[in-house]
Image: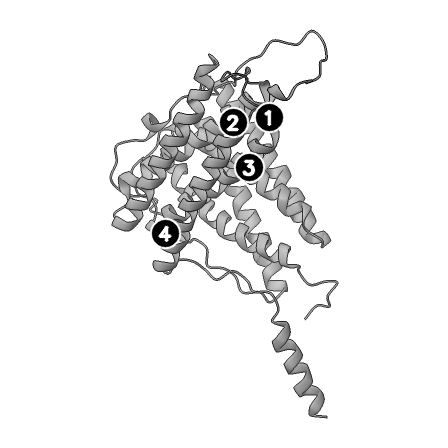
Amino acid sequence: MPDNNERLTSSEISNLWTHYIRETMQICVTKYFLPIIKDPEIHKIYTLALEMSENHVIKIRDIFHKENFPIPKGFTKEDVNLHAPPLFTDAFSIFYIHTMTMHGSQAYNLAFSVSIRKDIRDFYYQCNLDTMDLYNKSFDVMQSKQLYDKPPFYETPSNVSFINSLNYVTDVLGERRKMNSIESGNIFFNLQKSLIAKACFFAFNQVCKDKEINHFINKCINRKNKHIGVFSNLLLKEDLHSPRALEPEVVKSTISPFSDKLMLFHSGFLIAAAISYYGSAIVTSIRADITYHCEKAIFDDLLLYGVFGKLLIKKKWLEQPPFADDRKLVSETGKRNQGSF
């Protein structure tokens, strides 16, 4: 066993373990999309995405082999039906991959910042470069096809000014100040992610045969409807536009391209991502009502995530995450070994 200076830390193990499972899931999704995408530019993006994910999985597997660490099962060819008919349009596919690069970049940045060993830092550094490259390429395709919804525009200020009243944060005689550009930008981008998530839930609900998972996905749809309504209304009150709905980009097919396990796991991933981006919005929003709505959305999604975890365990689909060293067992073993001399 490597000495303590070479061993993987708990953060490194948990991130590698989590990303292995997520990357294998993404490989299944990407492999399904490739045969059904007709647009050559979008197809090229997915070909690159598949290559990146497969390289990441190989690298993580190599690290685990060197550490004599068991390889997670994750997701395999059993979790995807490559012969299933299209469930999504080409337009949805580019929205989807673009959003997943944003989620991936956030996760890789965090993993990089808590990694100690150089090989692990190098790995996540490359993952970040890969994801940023894919983000740029997917963004360029969306813009070239006029699919990208731009966030609201604001006038350029004529001078620098400072906030000099607490009324900026709280209500003033029942009236609220205008939303600033940071707040509206957060709401707009979070709405884009919510709309992608809702379309995924909508598609999964359409093809999933398991009644319990369908019930859970219905809850996800209802929760997204609630949050999309709240935050869209905030923009509407400011005469600002919201991103487009994406349910029309889901094709009316009832043949599932994914296993129930993959659809449940993917749904949980999207809920966890939502908790993260609402949290980011809280720390950059100043208006009290916006902060409240973000906090309420996080609370709603945490309750939903708890249901997700219980359902994974009930279905026996939740792999056991790595444990920390059992210090008591190590100590007792050491004492017994000392007594044997």
In this view, 160 is above or below 68: above
**Alpha carbon separation for disc pair 3 and 4:** 27 Å
Single out the mark in the foreground, 1 or 3: 1
The reply to whether dot 1 and dot 2 touch (C-beta < 8 Å) is yes
Q: CA distance from mark 4 to mark 2?
A: 35 Å
- Give the mark nearer the N terminus: 2 vs 3: 3
Residue type, numbered disc 4: Lys
Q: Are marks 2 and 3 in contact (CB under 8 Å)?
A: no
Q: Provide the residue designation for mark 1.
A: 286
Q: Secondary structure at mark 2?
A: helix
Q: Residue 231's image quarter?
A: top left
Q: Kindly check if marks 4 and 2 are in contact, taking CB atoms under 8 A apart as contact.
A: no
Residue 331 seen by the camera? yes
Q: Residue at x 66, y 78 (%)?
A: 331
The residue that mark 2 highlights is: 290
Which mark sits nearer the N-terminus, 1 or 3? 3
Residue 206 location (% of width, % of height): 27, 38
Whole-angstrom CA distance, mark 2 to mark 3, is 12 Å
Tally of numbered tags:
4
Disc sitting over residue 261 in the figure: 4
Q: What percent of the width, then of the height, locates residue 18?
A: 53, 52
The numbered disc on residue 279 is 3
Q: Counting residues from the N terminus, which is met first, the one under dot 4 or under dot 2? A: 4
The amino acid at mark 3 is: Gly
Query: Mark 3 or 4 closer to N-term?
Result: 4
- Tell whether 313 sits left or right of 294: left
SS under mark 1 = loop
Q: Is residue 238 left or right of residue 122?
A: left
Q: Quadrant of residue 257?
A: top left
Which amino acid type is shown beneath numbered disc 1? Ile
The image shows residue 124 at horizontal and vertical percentages of 64, 46
